[in-house]
Image (cartoon, helix red, strand yellow):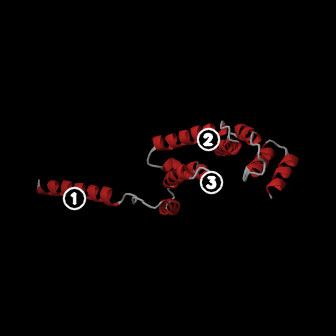
Amino acid sequence: NTSVVISVFLLIVTFLFINLFSNDPIFTNLSKQIEYGKKTAQPWLESSAYKTLLQKDTNDLDLQFTFIKSHFDENQYMGPSEQDFNREGTFLFNYYTNCSKSTNLKKADMGQLCLALYYYYRNDHALCRSHLENVHNDKLKYVNTYLGIQNYYFNEPKKAMQCFAKEI
């Protein structure tokens, strides 16, 4: 009897110890959260930090690109919540769809480009290409690179080379 009680007690203490002390740290600095997410292969920590940063600075295209890319990182599926992953994907889609419909041409181009990246990382090359072709400012960073990639995908190497040359 005593050994069973001691065994159960030790099991409970071990369980509590593991759950209380093995969680990810709570971050007050988003840069540290991103860095920790990269070091520990936890892209959901990165993407949630990028989402917060994006809401503070909506014009930073590199930040938007990194947010989308981190959302589709192959390790996202190991995250703590599939619902959070899907909710974030829905946020991305809705946010950039709204941007793409803006009357502000710069914002609409950014929305089209980011939707293209969204579809690129979902391996939907037709929709990616379609959104890239809807970007009016062909000098916008990433547009010609990804349009070139799509042209190669659709077996149009001459068009692809022209796009790559524009990007350079």
The residue lying at 74 percent from left, 51 percent from top is 140
Front label number (1 vs 2): 2
Residue 90 in the image, given as x and y percentages of width and height: 54, 38
- Find disc 3 in the rendering and name its residue: 60
> Residue 136: percent from the left, percent from the top?
77, 43
Crowding near the residue tagged with mark 1, few <14, some 14–19, many ≥20 C-alpha atoms within 10 Å: few
**Image position of 128 (left or right of 46):** right
Determine the residue located farthest toward the left in the rendered image: 1
The amino acid on which the numbered mark 3 sits, given as a three-letter code, is: Asp
Q: Which mark is residue 115?
A: none
**Total tally of numbered discs in the picture:** 3
Question: Closer to the N terminus: mark 1 or mark 2?
Answer: 1
| Left or right of 30, for residue 57 | right
Q: Secondary structure at mark 1?
A: helix
Q: Secondary structure at mark 2?
A: helix
The answer for how far apart the CA atoms under marks 1 and 2 are is 52 Å
The numbered dot on residue 10 is 1
Q: Specify the amino acid type for callout 2.
A: Tyr
Which is more foreground, mark 3 or mark 2? 3
Q: Nearer the viewer, residue 18 or 25?
A: 25
- Mark with earlier residue (3, 1): 1
Q: Residue at x 58, y 40 (%)?
A: 95
Relative vertical location of residue 18 with respect to residue 128 in this rendering, above or below: below
For marks 3 and 2 on the same chain, the one whose residue lies earlier in the sequence: 3
Q: Nearer the viewer, residue 8 or 95?
A: 95
Mark 1: which amino acid? Leu
Would you call the spot at circle 3 few (<14 residues within 10 Å), some (14-19), or many (20 or more)?
Answer: few
- In three-dimensional space, the C-alpha distance between marks 3 and 2, rounded to whole angstroms, equals 14 Å
- Cα gap from disc 3 to disc 1, whole angstroms: 52 Å
Q: Position of residue 88 (x, y in %)?
A: 52, 43
Residue 35 position, x and y percent, is 51, 63
What residue is pinned by disc 2? 96
